[in-house]
Amino acid sequence: MKRLVVFTGAGVSAESGINTFRDSNGLWEQYRIEDVATPEAFQRDPSLVLEFYNQRRKQVKDAKPNAAHRALVELEKYFKTQIITQNIDDLHERAGSTNVIHLHGQIMQARSTGDESLIYDLETTELVIGDKCEKGFQLRPHIVWFGEMVPEMERATYYASMADVFIVIGSSLEVYPAAGLLNYAPEQAQKYLIDPNAKELYHMSNLSVIKDTAGKAVPQLVKKLINNTHAS
């Protein structure tokens, strides 16, 4: 069974109604990134940061997986499938995907500010000052903020380096280090880039660029890949 890696960015969740800061000139839901998505912002005004993510959490809870999320689930029947996502929502899991690496954390989880190994699933959309871990430290969103290390990057690059098929969906390939993942895919691997604003990467071998939305292009590509497994 071939190994297939799917790398998803904001574009795959945008069609479910989840906005990103890149949609509006560096503003994220009318907030400056520096005010809500950095360690310094949390130190400066933790209440503002927690409330910002409470609102994002509500947005995620109201969102539903779209056609792209649902189509990717089918790949698990025919390939050893690993999804790597920059997105902090849980739409891949809710659609049914079982192997998902979240490079930038998960909004439906919180972690201790004093012990990073203590991570908790959130049953509510609210996380406030005074919510503490078992060791007495304040909880924060389990999100990789700008300026922080990406702890899952090593695992992600391992899977990328093993791919027979590598698909990038809805990513501008501009946010590093995650954007460099495509470079770890083997030269002989078949590669696909799906994004309405995709740029031609002429230096990349075996790359097919599909300038369309995830909701339209992903189901079509999934069908093609599955048909190819039947034919081979």
Image (cartoon, grey):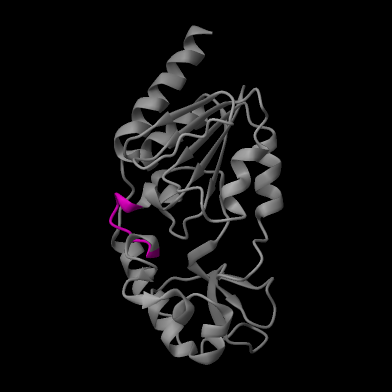
Q: Along the horizontal axis of the image, is 94 left or right of 64?
A: right
Quarter residue 135 falls in: bottom right
Q: Is residue 72 magenta?
A: no
Q: Along the horizontal axis of the image, is 25 left or right of 201?
A: left
Residue drawn at x 51%, y 54% as measured from the top left: 86
Residue drawn at x 65%, y 73% as measured from the top left: 118
Measuring from the top left, give residue 38's x and y in whole percent: 54, 77
Measuring from the top left, give residue 19's x and y in whole percent: 33, 61
Indicate whether 221 appears above or below 150. Answer: above
Indicate whether 183 appears above or below 115. Answer: above
- Overall secondary structure of the magenta stretch? loop
Residue most extreme to the front: 202
Foreground: 101 or 180? 180
Foreground: 70 or 8? 8
Residue drawn at x 68%, y 30% as measured from the top left: 186
Count up the numbered dots.
0
Q: Quadrant of the C terminus?
A: top right
Measuring from the top left, give residue 99's x and y in whole percent: 56, 44
| Magenta segment boundaries in residue numbering | 14-21
Q: Along the horizontal axis of the image, is 171 left or right of 81?
A: left
Q: Quadrant of the N terminus?
A: top right
Residue most extreme to the top: 231
Measuring from the top left, give residue 188's x and y in whole percent: 65, 22
Indicate whether 118 appears above or below 227. Answer: below
Foreground: 55 or 108? 55
